[in-house]
Image: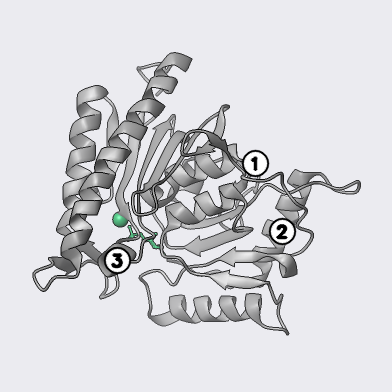
Amino acid sequence: MPPSRVLTDQDQHELLQSLIEVARKAGEVMQTGSTHMLTASANIAQKASAVDLVTEWDVKTEDLIRTELEKAWPGFGFIGEESYTDETKLTNEPTFCVDPIDGTTNFIHSFPFACVSIGVLYEKQPIIGVVFNPFLNQLYSGRVGHGSFLNETRRLPLYPPRPLTSLSEALVGIEWGSKRTGPAIEAKIASFKALAAQEGKMVHGLRSMGSAALNYCLVASGSLDIYWEIGCWPWDISAGAIIAQEAGGFVSGAPNSPHDGVIDEKLLTGRKYIVVRAVAGSESESSLQCQQRLVKDFLATVVDYEP
Ligand code: IPD
Ligand code: CA
């Protein structure tokens, strides 16, 4: 069914401003929360595993975001990590897709690499994204057709795209995620080895920073060359994916996906994600061809597994 509401250019502009305003307010809640985190009374609960954590501040932050957005944009759908249930359905209607705190483990440990991530999906595709790290005061934003920015003024990527001819030249974002058992952990270890070892691709380095949304923003900035993870959810990546794409990044998914750069429902919900930064093309290869080649080479190097 087509969406009942058409989003005009003006609507999209206003939505982006709303998201920025709400993300900054959410950032204040996170900062307040972080002062409680290292105290004995900090309320930390486990979800799917002992390393899948949630705090009362995740819930408080999502409540604030939801209340503010529902007031400003009544009738929009809302998918949030902390309120998601099996009944939550993605429709073609304009929908907020929210991770109130991405990088909860960092948040708990006062490692200043956590953010609020708010995306707008329209016809099941991200069109606007805002990712705000209040601890470093870094706000990333992107809007389809209008580019991406750091702190609203600095266009991404931060520098003109450099070439990236092979994986061996790459600084790669990876994550351990919260599934640390069975085939998943074996596949992760084998993949990290295949990327890092001399007998493998021997990439320049692997970085595990603990926030999927911020990893996309680092790729958008040009600071990370590639980020790959299996196991995230749409709220981890919706905002980051549009920010990276609007910065010239190439966003893709599972090994058997089309690798056409389209961020559709299948990619969003597929739980397998890869993104390559904007690269300079060469005489023999366009920038898109280079990004697609790197994605294929990367996915042939790592071990695929079901999250
Ligand atoms: C997690 C972080 C982490 C990634 C996990 C995510 P959370 O989100 O983004 O970097 O490895 O897959 O679930 O739990 O901090 O919102
Ligand atoms: Ca979260």
Residue that mark 3 sits on: 110
In the picture shown, does residue 174 fall above or below 237?
below
Taking the spot 21% from the left edge, 47% from the top edge, the residue there is: 29
**Left or right for 174, reference 239:** right
Which label's residue is closer to the chain start, 2 or 3?
3
User: Where residue 154 sits: x, y (%)?
Assistant: 55, 37
Residue type marked 1: Gly
Residue that mark 1 sits on: 248
Image depth: mark 3 or mark 1 in front: 3
Colour convention: one colour
Could you tell me which secondary element the residue under label 2 belongs to? helix
Q: Quadrant of residue 90?
A: top left
Could you tell me which secondary element the residue under label 3 belongs to? loop
The reply to whether the residue tagged 2 has its Cβ within 8 angstroms of ligand 1 is: no
Which label's residue is closer to the chain start, 3 or 1?
3
Q: Label 2, label 3: how many angstroms apart (C-alpha)?
A: 35 Å
Taking the spot 35% from the left edge, 57% from the top edge, the residue there is: 114
Which label's residue is closer to the chain start, 1 or 2?
1
Residue that mark 2 sits on: 294
